[in-house]
C-alpha cells in the first residue's frame, strides 16, 4: 500500500495529518501489508526509518507520485490521511488508472467543489447559508449583492482556508475575489452569506459505505468565522442543546451516506437563530483527529485504515459514538509574537502553528489548563482592563462584578467606566488611545494590566483595538477580543461568559 503524506509543514497543514498517516502505516503493517510512504518532510514521524517498509522523499505533485507508482505498482493508494495536498491529486490519479482506496474521487470532488456540494445539500434538504458561484469579478459583484453583505468568499480545493475572507462591502470585494480566484487555480469561488453571531460545531466521523458513525462533536469557543484550525474547541459541547446535537448527528450521517464515505469525514456547522446550517464537509482526515483519538481513547485513524482496505465498521467493533470522561479542550498556539507586523486578528484564513490539550472534570478548569499549556497564563490577581461597546455593557457589568469580588482592580475606558460606577463598582478611568495619553496602551506597557477584555465598535475603535492587540502580544497580556471588532455583535456576550467560567476561584 502506498500512503501519501502531507508534504512540508506549513501554516494550514501540519503534524495532525502526519499522525494519521503513521497510524495507518502501523495498522496496515500489523495486518500484513507492505507499506510505502511518500512524503518530503524529514521533520515528521512518517519519514522515520522504521515507520514504513520503503520511503520516498518526493514532492507531492502528480508527476512525482506517478513516478513512484510506476516503479512500485502498489495494490492501493491512500490519499485521505495526508490533508488537502494529496487529496487534490485524486482526479489526476484516477484518470491514470491508479487504484485509490477509501472515498472515491467523484465523492471528493462533490464535497470539495463548493457549487456541487451546495446542490447536494439542496437535494438532501439540509440548510446552508445563501450562496452563489463566481468565475470573475463581475459575477462576484452580482452574487454578493444578491446574497447581501457581509459575505464569506471561499475558493475551492484550498489549504488552511487560504484566500478566504469576510467581506463587509463592495469596496473590499474586488481584492478578496482576486486573491480567491488566484488561489483556486481556475476553480469557481463560492460567495455565501456570512453567519454573524453563530456558534460553530466541528464533527469528525467515519463511514464504510454502509453506515456512518460519529466520532466526536466539538463546540468552537470562538464565534463562527474563525478558521477551525485556529479556534479553540471543547469536547463534549457544553452550550449546545440535545435538540441541535441530534440534528447535527443526523445531518452528518446523511451527508456521509450521500457521499459514500469510506474512511474519515469532517463536517463543520453553524447554529444561528435555532437553525443548524452546514458550512462545509471534508471527506478526509481533519486537524482534530489526533485530539479526538486521545480524548475518546478510540483510534479513528486506525479504524479508517481498516475500513479503506475492506473491513466494515461492524467487523472492527466501531458502531457507536465514543463517550468521553469530563471535558477536553483543544487550544491553538499562534505565532503573532514572532511576526508582529501582521494583522493580529483571527479569521477564516488559518494562522496557527501548533495546538495543545487540556482535560478536567469541568469546562472552565480544562480551558484554563489548555491556556497554560499554550503559554497564556491566566492572572489570579492584578488589573483588568475592560473596554466594550454599548451592545456588551450588560455582560461586562456581570464580568466586572465577579472580578471585583475576586480582588481584581478594574480599569475601563470612559463609557465603560461610567456604566460600572452607576452600579457602584470601583473602577479607574483610563483614556482610549484616540483620546491621548495616558491611555490604555500606556498602562499595558507599564505592566499594570494582567487581562484585557475589548469589544470595539467603529473605525476609531478598530484602530485602537489594533494597537491594544499589538501591546498585549508584546507584553504577554491575555486578550479577549471578537473576531470582527468593527461590527456590533451580541455574540460578544459569549466571550464574557467564557471569561467568567475560567476566572472562577478554585
Image (cartoon, rainbow, N blue to C red):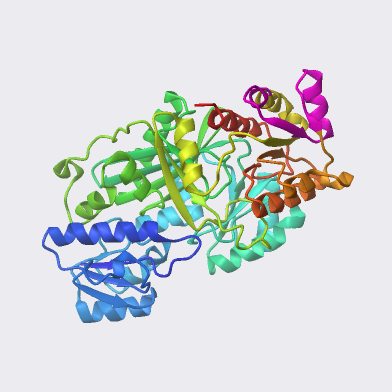
Q: Position of residue 128 (x, y in %)?
A: 52, 41
Front residue of 406 and 74: 406
Residue 18 in the figure: left or right of residue 393:
left
Q: Position of residue 356 (x, y in %)?
A: 44, 48
What residue span does the magenta drawing correspond to? 401-428
Front residue of 458 and 451: 451
Tell me which residue sits at (24%, 58%) in the image: 24
Q: Is residue 33 above or below residue 313?
A: below
Q: Residue furthest top?
A: 423
Q: Residue furthest left?
A: 32
Number of disc labels: 0
Tell me which residue sits at (19%, 57%) in the image: 27
Q: Position of residue 461 (x, y in %)?
A: 79, 44
Residue 419 in the figure: left or right of residue 63:
right
Using the rendered view, name the quadrant where residue 18 is placed.
bottom left
- Judge whether residue 53 is colored magenta: no
Residue 257 makes an appearance in the image: no
Q: Position of residue 375 (x, y in %)?
A: 52, 49
Q: Quadrant of the N terminus?
A: bottom left
Residue 479 in the figure: left or right of residue 159:
right
Tell me which residue sits at (66%, 59%) in the image: 139
Residue 457 makes an appearance in the image: yes
- Judge whether residue 406 is colored magenta: yes
Tell me which residue sits at (73%, 51%) in the image: 466
Using the rendered view, name the quadrant where residue 223 is placed.
top right
Front residue of 123 and 383: 383
Using the rendered view, name the quadrant where residue 210 is placed.
top left
Front residue of 78 and 338: 338
Amino acid at each position: 500500500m502506498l500512503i501519501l503524506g502531507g508534504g512540508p509543514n506549513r501554516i494550514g497543514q501540519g503534524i495532525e495529518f502526519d499522525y494519521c498517516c503513521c497510524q495507518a502505516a502501523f495498522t496496515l503493517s500489523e495486518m500484513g501489508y507492505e507499506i510505502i510512504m511518500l512524503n518530503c518532510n524529514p521533520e515528521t514521524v512518517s519519514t522515520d526509518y522504521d515507520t514504513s517498509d520503503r520511503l520516498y522523499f518526493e514532492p507531492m505533485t502528480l508527476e512525482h507520485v506517478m513516478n513512484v507508482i510506476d516503479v512500485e505498482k502498489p495494490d492501493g493508494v491512500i490519499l485521505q490521511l495526508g490533508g488537502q495536498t494529496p487529496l487534490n491529486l485524486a482526479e489526476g490519479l484516477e484518470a491514470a488508472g491508479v487504484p485509490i482506496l477509501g472515498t472515491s474521487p467523484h465523492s471528493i470532488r462533490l464535497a470539495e467543489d463548493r457549487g456541487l456540494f451546495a446542490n447536494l445539500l439542496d437535494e438532501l434538504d439540509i440548510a446552508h447559508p445563501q450562496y452563489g458561484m463566481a468565475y470573475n469579478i463581475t459575477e462576484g459583484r452580482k452574487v454578493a449583492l444578491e446574497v447581501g453583505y457581509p459575505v464569506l468568499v471561499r475558493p475551492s480545493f484550498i489549504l488552511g482556508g487560504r484566500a478566504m475572507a469576510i467581506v463587509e462591502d463592495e469596496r473590499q470585494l474586488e481584492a478578496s475575489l482576486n486573491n480567491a480566484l488566484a488561489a483556486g487555480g481556475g476553480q469557481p469561488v463560492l460567495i455565501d452569506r456570512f453567519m454573524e453571531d453563530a456558534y460553530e460545531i466541528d464533527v469528525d466521523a467515519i463511514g464504510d459505505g454502509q453506515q456512518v458513525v460519529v466520532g466526536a462533536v466539538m463546540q468552537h469557543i470562538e464565534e463562527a468565522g474563525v478558521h477551525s484550525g485556529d479556534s479553540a474547541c471543547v469536547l463534549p459541547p457544553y452550550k449546545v442543546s440535545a435538540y441541535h446535537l441530534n440534528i447535527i448527528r443526523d445531518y452528518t450521517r446523511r451527508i456521509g451516506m450521500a457521499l459514500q464515505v469510506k474512511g474519515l469525514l469532517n463536517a463543520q456547522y453553524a447554529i444561528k437563530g435555532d437553525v443548524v446550517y452546514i458550512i462545509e464537509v471534508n471527506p478526509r482526515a481533519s486537524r482534530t483527529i489526533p485530539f479526538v483519538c486521545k480524548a475518546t481513547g478510540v483510534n479513528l485513524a486506525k479504524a479508517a485504515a481498516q475500513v479503506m482496505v475492506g473491513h466494515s465498521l461492524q467487523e472492527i467493533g466501531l458502531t457507536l459514538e465514543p463517550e468521553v470522561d469530563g471535558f477536553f479542550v483543544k487550544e491553538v498556539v499562534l505565532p503573532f509574537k514572532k511576526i508582529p507586523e501582521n494583522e493580529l486578528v483571527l479569521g477564516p484564513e488559518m494562522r496557527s502553528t501548533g495546538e495543545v490539550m487540556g482535560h478536567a472534570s469541568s469546562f472552565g478548569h480544562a480551558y484554563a489548563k489548555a491556556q497554560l499549556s499554550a503559554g497564556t497564563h491566566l492572572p489570579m490577581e492584578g488589573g483588568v482592563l475592560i473596554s466594550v461597546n454599548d451592545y456588551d455593557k450588560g455582560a461586562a457589568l456581570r464580568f466586572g462584578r465577579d472580578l471585583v469580588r475576586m480582588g481584581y482592580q478594574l480599569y475601563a475606558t470612559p463609557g465603560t467606566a461610567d456604566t460600572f460606577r452607576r452600579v457602584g463598582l470601583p473602577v479607574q478611568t483610563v483614556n482610549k488611545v484616540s483620546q491621548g495619553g495616558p491611555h490604555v496602551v500606556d498602562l499595558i506597557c507599564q505592566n499594570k494590566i494582567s487581562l484585557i477584555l475589548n469589544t470595539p465598535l467603529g473605525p476609531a475603535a478598530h484602530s485602537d483595538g489594533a494597537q491594544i492587540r499589538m501591546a498585549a502580544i508584546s507584553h504577554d497580556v491575555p486578550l479577549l477580543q471578537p473576531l470582527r471588532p468593527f461590527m456590533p455583535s451580541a455574540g460578544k456576550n459569549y466571550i464574557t461568559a467564557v471569561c467568567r467560567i475560567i476566572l472562577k476561584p478554585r
